[in-house]
Image (cartoon, helix red, strand yellow):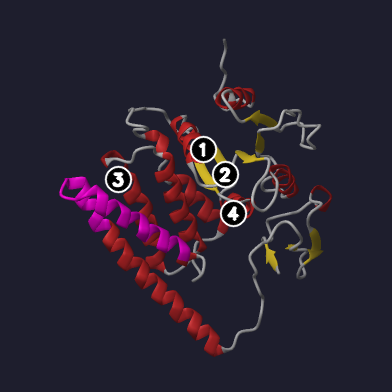
Amino acid sequence: MERRLGDDVKVKAENCPHFKISSGKPGNSLYFIKTFPLYLPKTRIMSKSPGVDAILKQLSVEFRESCEDSLVIVDNALTRLMDGSGDWDEDFPEVLRRIHSIKGGGGTFGFPAITMIAHALEDYIETAGTVGSEHLPAIQVYCDTIRDIADTGVNPGDSETTEILRALPVSGSVAVNAITTEQKTREIGFLLVLPKGLQRRIIGEELASCGFRVSLAETALQAIEIALANPPDIFAASRFNEDMTGIELARVFKAIDALSDAKFLLMTSADETDPKTLGLSNDARVARKGDKFTEDMTNHLIEWGVFGDIRT
C-alpha cells in the first residue's frame, strides 16, 4: 500500500522514523511506504484497458449529474430558509445530508477538490456555533463553488485547490453563538485534530470567533490529507489519537517541506509540558487540558504573534 504525495512534496526521512522512504519514478519523486502506525490510502498505478477507462469516465459523469441533483435540492432548501418559508428542522438536516454525500463521492470519482470543499463546508458549519439565516449566504458560496467544478468536469490542480479553499467564507466573520462580531479573518489557517464531539466543537468555535480559518480532522491521516490540500499555519492535536500520537504527527509535518513551518500545539492531560522532554521541536508548545486550557492556548498564540503586536 502506498500513496504518492506529489512532485512538490519533499520528505526528510531522518525526521520521520515511522516511515520508510523510497524513490519513485525518474525525477526523484518521493513516496510514503505504509508502516505502522499510519495507513495511507492505496493508490495503484496500473495500465488500464480502454473498457476500464470508459467505465471510469461514465462513473465520473454520473457523479457530476448526481452532484448537480443534490445541489439543486440544497439550493431550494437554502432559498426556503432564507425567505422564511422553510422548516429548519427538515430543510437544514437535508442540506447536511446532501453535502456529506457529495463529500464522500468527490474523491472516489475523480474530484478530490469537491471533497475538500464539502469537508470545509462541514467545518464551517461545525465552528459557526448556532447556525442561523446569517450563515446561509456563505453556505451558498460553498455550494456554488462545488457546482462550478462539477460543471467544468475538471478537477483543479493542487495550487488552484488551495486558492479556492482559502477564498471560501470563514465562520468567524459572521454571528458566532448569536453574538454579532466584526472580527476580520486573520488569514491564518488552524488545523484542529480531535475526534468529533463537544470538546472539538467548543475549541473550534472559539478559534473561529477569533477569525482563524479553522479546519477539522478526526484522525492524523485525515489531518495530513487536509494539510497537503491547504497547508495550515498552526495545527493542534491530542497526545493520543486513533492512528498515531500527536508527537508522531508533529514529526510527520516536520518531515514534509510544504508543512514543516507550521506551528504545533500539543494538547495533553499529562503533567509534562516541556517540548524538548516530549521529543518535540523547540518551536512547539504544549497546552494542558482542563480549566486553564483556553488561557494556555491563547498565551501560546500570542507568543507566536498571530494577534499582531499586543502590548500590556
Contact, mark 1 vs mark 2 (Cβ under 8 Å): yes
Compare residues 194 and 77 and report the one nearer the observer: 194
| Residue at point 65%, 39% (across, down) | 262
Of mark 1 and mark 2, the one earlier in the sequence is: 2
Task: Give the residues drawn in magenta, as a range.
Answer: 75-104
Helix, strand or loop at disc 1? helix
**Residue 206, position in %: x, y?**
47, 31
Label 3 – label 1 distance at C-alpha: 27 Å
Confirm whether the magenta stretch covers residue 92.
yes
Residue that carries the numbered disc 1 in the rendered image: 199
Mark 2: give few (<14), some (14-19) or many (20+) Cα within 10 Å: many
Residue that carries the numbered disc 4 in the rendered image: 222
- Name the amino acid type tagged 1: Gln
- Name the amino acid type tagged 2: Leu
Residue that carries the numbered disc 2 in the rendered image: 194
Of mark 3 and mark 1, the one earlier in the sequence is: 3
Residue that carries the numbered disc 3 in the rendered image: 137
The majority secondary structure of the magenta stretch comes to: helix
Of mark 4 and mark 3, the one earlier in the sequence is: 3
